[in-house]
Image (cartoon, grey):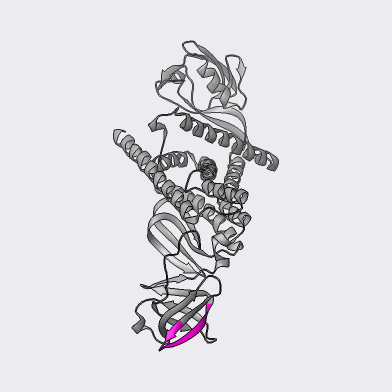
């Protein structure tokens, strides 16, 4: 069940992961002088929108990511051509501040004429034929074009994404995943301080009817040895010993109430794995700062290895469709970790942030990794790829990603229906 507290935690987790990723793109794009038109969380129809400075901030319907729209990345939607009749609004110094493209008769305090020449990227001027007289007007670098009630700020060449150096553009792209890596480390560090350093493994719960219950194990028991192997704080040893004990009895030494006891049990096979029916916890002490940093780094390294192992299984085809999960499955798993407690939810959020950063660096069209590949090719080649061709590659990649997303989401729904 999804409690209100869990829902709030899950929504907050996704909001922070996506927002920080996009903020990385946004911050370094702004530092490079690029005009950022929109900072969006989600895709699809807008739910909420407001504009501050040059950037419009939007919250969209589908919570499956976000984007930062920079000037020059895609062809500009608003176009003005010679021969078109427009209205110009001038500031006190005679510089164009607004270019109106429709409803010209309703505009007041404007100059109306037919466009003879127009340059909104380099020289920033517009020449109008006003009552048979050609008049040239300078255009402000932040002038607005207005049509159908929408304002679009012009983007001089030096404010466009493509005008910046390869290094500046690469940094603006790479900064998104980097923010996720930094967030993952911070979350792992917080989880380490909350969880502490394990000293001993104890039982959190024992499943009814399981071999562990039949052997007399109870929640709170401390596991000292299994088959003469000292356990200490390493829960992995318990798993290893269980998997080595198919069809044979295991000897456990546990501590309960300060006294040690010996029990015998034989694992049972369930869903292709040997289990004894226990859920483990640990007895911990507070971590020092150095131990916290070391533990957070170890968590980063271990989680990264597992992520790449999952990618390898997908590439080699060594997986089932049920192994893949979309947004619904991620929410389900998030709810499970939220049920375990805040420290587990924080650690899971760190893993998800790390996964988001790594996944975005894959050289898949529409992802940050693919855009970095194009920039690397440009650096070696000495000139950029045709922007229209690159945009087409990213568009096709995005469409394919959406198809995959729909497929795994459909599979998630089937799994829910089947229970």
Q: Please give left or right for residue 254 compared with residue 338 in the image.
A: right
Which residue occupies 41% across, 88% down? Answer: 132
Q: Quadrant of the N terminus?
A: top left
Residue 295, position in %: x, y?
64, 37
Which residue occupies 48% across, 24% down? Answer: 218
Count of numbered tags: 0
Kindly give the residue lying farthest to the left in the view shown.
417
Vertically, is 363 above or below 91?
above
236 or 135, which lies in front? 135
Kindly give the residue lying farthest to the right in the view shown.
290
Q: Quadrant of the C terminus?
A: top left
Residue 297, position in %: x, y?
64, 39
64 or 77, which lies in front? 77
Residue 183, position in %: x, y?
58, 48
Q: Magenta stretch?
A: 128-139
Residue 352, position in %: x, y?
51, 42
Examine the structure image and report whether residue 212 is included in the region drawn in magenta. no
Which residue occupies 49% across, 10% down? Answer: 248
One can see residue 178 in this view? no
Vertically, is 411 above or below 244?
below
What type of secondary structure mainly makes up the magenta span?
A: strand
Q: Please give left or right for residue 130 compared with residue 185 in the image.
A: left
One can see residue 22 in this view? yes
Determine which quarter of the picture holds residue 294: top right
Vertically, is 257 above or below 414?
above
Which residue occupies 57% across, 37% down? Answer: 304
268 or 368, which lies in front? 368
């Amino acid at each position: 069940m999804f409690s209100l507290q869990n829902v709030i935690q899950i929504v907050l987790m996704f909001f922070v992961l996506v927002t920080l990723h996009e903020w990385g793109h946004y911050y370094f794009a702004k530092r490079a002088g690029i005009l950022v038109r929109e900072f969006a969380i989600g895709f699809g129809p807008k739910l909420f929108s407001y504009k501050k400075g040059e950037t419009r901030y939007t919250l969209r319907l589908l919570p499956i990511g976000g984007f930062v729209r920079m000037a020059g990345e895609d062809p500009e939607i608003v176009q003005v051509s010679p021969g078109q009749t427009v209205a110009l609004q001038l500031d006190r110094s005679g510089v164009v501040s607004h270019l109106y493209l429709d409803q010209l008769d309703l505009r007041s305090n404007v100059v109306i004429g037919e466009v003879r020449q127009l340059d909104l990227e380099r020289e920033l001027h517009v020449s109008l034929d006003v009552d048979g007289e050609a008049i040239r007007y300078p255009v402000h670098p932040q002038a607005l074009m207005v049509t159908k009630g929408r304002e679009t700020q012009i983007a001089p060449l030096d404010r466009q994404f493509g005008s910046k150096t390869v290094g500046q553009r690469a940094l603006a792209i790479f900064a998104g995943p980097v923010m996720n890596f930094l967030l993952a480390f911070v979350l792992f560090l917080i989880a380490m301080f909350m969880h502490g350093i394990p000293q001993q493994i104890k039982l959190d719960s024992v499943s009814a009817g399981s071999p562990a219950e039949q052997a007399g194990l109870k929640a709170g028991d401390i596991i000292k040895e299994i088959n003469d192997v000292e356990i200490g704080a390493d829960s992995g040893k318990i798993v290893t010993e269980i998997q080595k004990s198919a069809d044979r009895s295991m000897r456990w030494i546990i501590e309960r109430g300060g006294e040690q006891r010996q029990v015998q049990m034989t694992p049972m096979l369930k869903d292709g794995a040997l289990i004894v029916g226990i859920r483990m916890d640990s007895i911990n002490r507070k971590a020092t700062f150095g131990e916290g940093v070391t533990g957070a780094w170890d968590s980063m390294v271990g989680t990264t290895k597992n992520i790449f192992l999952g990618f390898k299984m997908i590439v080699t085809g060594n997986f089932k469709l049920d192994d893949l999960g979309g947004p619904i499955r991620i929410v389900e798993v998030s709810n499970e970790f939220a049920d375990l407690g805040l420290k587990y939810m924080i650690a899971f959020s760190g893993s998800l942030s790390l996964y988001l950063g790594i996944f975005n660096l894959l050289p898949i069209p529409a992802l940050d990794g693919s855009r970095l590949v194009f920039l690397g090719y440009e650096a070696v080649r000495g000139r950029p790829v045709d922007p229209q061709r690159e945009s087409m590659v990213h568009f096709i990649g995005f469409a394919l990603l959406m198809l995959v997303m729909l497929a795994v989401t459909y599979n998630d729904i089937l799994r829910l229906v089947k229970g």
